[in-house]
Image (cartoon, coloured by chain):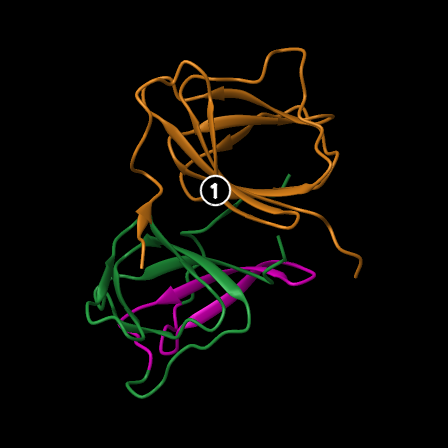
Chain colours: A orange, B green
């Protein structure tokens, strides 16, 4: 039995945000994302083909949803469901410590 | 945007282990499990039809895999992949504080 830890093995180089696949199975993907002061470029939005369920496990972040004025503050344990094509961007992530996310991407099924 | 927190809204009554569905989509199920001193009955094993990826987020637990002698100690952030029909049982969970798990159940796809 291999036990891994979501808070461990953080790469030294966090110049760029890190995306690591944990599980891939058909259209399902579990991913660890590590941010440190990263943000989505000002004029860009995530516009994804799949639904995404994402939980922030460490650090903090501000999430912007297109058409919503308020920035959604996320602290450890907070999770949201981002349906496919709901445009969103990460306004900020903690610059002092790593922000660790677990994202579950999946293709929405009828019913 | 609805933000929920995986550590919040813990039921008062934890006489029985609590299983709460967070997302269901086709064969995919995300589930929060709350344990407090619970264990799988001594003569029982989980023998599941689907693969399960599970992460322990709070508390601690001991996991037993059929055929392995050592009890796998799980602390916050630890995760394991339990393929379908890999028999396993929870030997113990923390009796002082809640143990919170996030489980992702999914049907293994070819390829």
| B67 with respect to A24 (left or right) | left
Assign a secondary structure to mark 1: strand
| B12 versus B30 height, above or below | below
| A17 versus B102 height, above or below | above
Seen at 50% across and 30% down, the residue is: A73
What subunit carries mark 1?
A: A
Q: Is residue B22 magenta?
A: yes
Where is residue B99 shown, x and y percent of the image?
A: 32, 61
**Residue nearest the viewer, comparing A50 with A63:** A50
Q: Residue furthest right?
A: A110
Where is residue B31 shown, x and y percent of the image?
A: 51, 61
Quadrant where the N terminus of chain B sits is top right
Where is residue B71 shown, x and y percent of the image?
A: 21, 67
**Residue nearest the viewer, comparing A49 with A95:** A49
| A28 versus B20 height, above or below | above
Q: Which residue is mark 1?
A: A78
Identify the magenta region: B12-40
Where is residue B76 shown, x and y percent of the image?
A: 29, 50
Quarter holding residue A45: top right
Q: Residue furthest front?
A: B111
Seen at 60% across and 63% down, the residue is: B107
Quarter holding residue B93: bottom left
Seen at 20% across and 72% down, the residue is: B69
Seen at 25% across and 53% down, the residue is: B75
Q: Is residue B103 magenta?
A: no
Quarter holding residue A6: top left
């Amino acid at each position: 039995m291999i036990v891994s830890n979501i808070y461990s093995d953080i790469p030294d180089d966090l110049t760029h945000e890190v995306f690591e696949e944990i599980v891939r199975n058909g259209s399902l993907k579990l991913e660890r994302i590590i941010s440190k002061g990263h943000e989505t470029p000002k004029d860009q939005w995530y516009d994804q083909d799949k639904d995404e369920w994402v939980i922030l496990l460490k650090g903090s972040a501000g999430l912007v949803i297109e058409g919503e004025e308020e920035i959604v503050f996320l602290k450890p344990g907070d999770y949201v469901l981002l349906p496919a094509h709901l445009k969103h961007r990460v306004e900020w992530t903690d610059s002092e410590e790593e922000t660790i996310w677990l994202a579950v991407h999946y293709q929405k099924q009828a019913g």
